[in-house]
Image (tube, grey):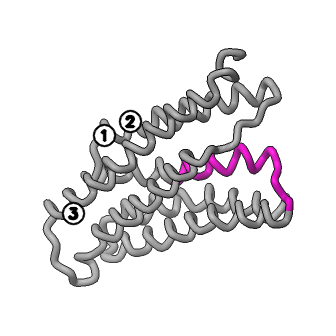
Amino acid sequence: MNLPNKLTISRILLCPFFVFFILLKDFKYNYIVALIIFIIASITDAIDGKIARKRNLITNFGKLMDPLADKLLVISGFISFISLGLASSYLVILIIARELLVTSLRLLSLEKGVVIEAGKYGKLKTIIQMVSIICIISIAALPSIGINISIDSIKFFANLFMYASTIITIFSGIDYMYKNKNIMLDL
C-alpha cells in the first residue's frame, strides 16, 4: 500500500477518536482535542492527493477511498453537531443524502469498470465542509479557553456555517449528476 493510501486509511481511523473527544462532556478541553484531531485528518486529505499526483501514485483504491474517507470524517462531524445541538438534523440529512447518493453512483459505475473521480465542485464542497466544521468547533471551544461567548452566539455561527455547507453540498450534487448523466443512464 502506497503512502497516499495509508494517509487515506489514517483519516478513516481518526474518525472514532474525533467523535469520542467532541462528545466527551466531562473533559474541559474536549473541543480542542477534537479540533486538533479533525485538523490533522483534514490535512491528510490535502497531503495524500498532492503526493499521489506528484509521485504518480494514483490508484483506483485512492480514487474511491479518498472521497469516502472525506465523507466519513465530515459526516462524523455533522452528526456530532446534532448531538451537541449545533446543527439542524434537516441540514445534516440533506448533506448525508447527497453523499450517499454520489457514493452509490460511484460504486455502481465502478461495477461497470468506470471510476468517477471527484470534480472541482466536489473538492470545493469538501473544503467548505471541513472549514465549516473547524470553525464551528473553534467557536464552541472558546469558553474552554476563557473566552466568554453565549450558547446563542455559538449556535448562530454554527448555523451560518451549516447553511453554507448545505448549499455547496446540494449544488455540487446537482453538478455531479449533470456531468455524469450519461454514466447514470447506462446503469
Q: Residue at x 52, y 52 (%)?
A: 124
Quadrant hosting residue 46: bottom right
- In the picture of the structure, the residue carrying the numbered disc 3 is 154
Q: Residue at x 59, y 68 (%)?
A: 43
Q: Report the quarter where the C terminus lies.
A: top right
94 or 146, which lies in front? 94
Left or right of residue 175: residue 51: right
Who comes first in sequence, dot 1 or dot 3? 1
Which three-letter amino acid code belongs to the residue tagged 3?
Ile
- Per the image, label 1 sits on a secondary structure element best described as helix
Q: Residue at x 68, y 21 (%)?
A: 182
Which three-letter amino acid code belongs to the residue tagged 1?
Ser
- 59 falls in the magenta region: yes
Who comes first in sequence, dot 3 or dot 2? 2
Q: Residue at x 69, y 42 (%)?
A: 117
On the image, the x and y values in percent for residue 111 come to 78, 26
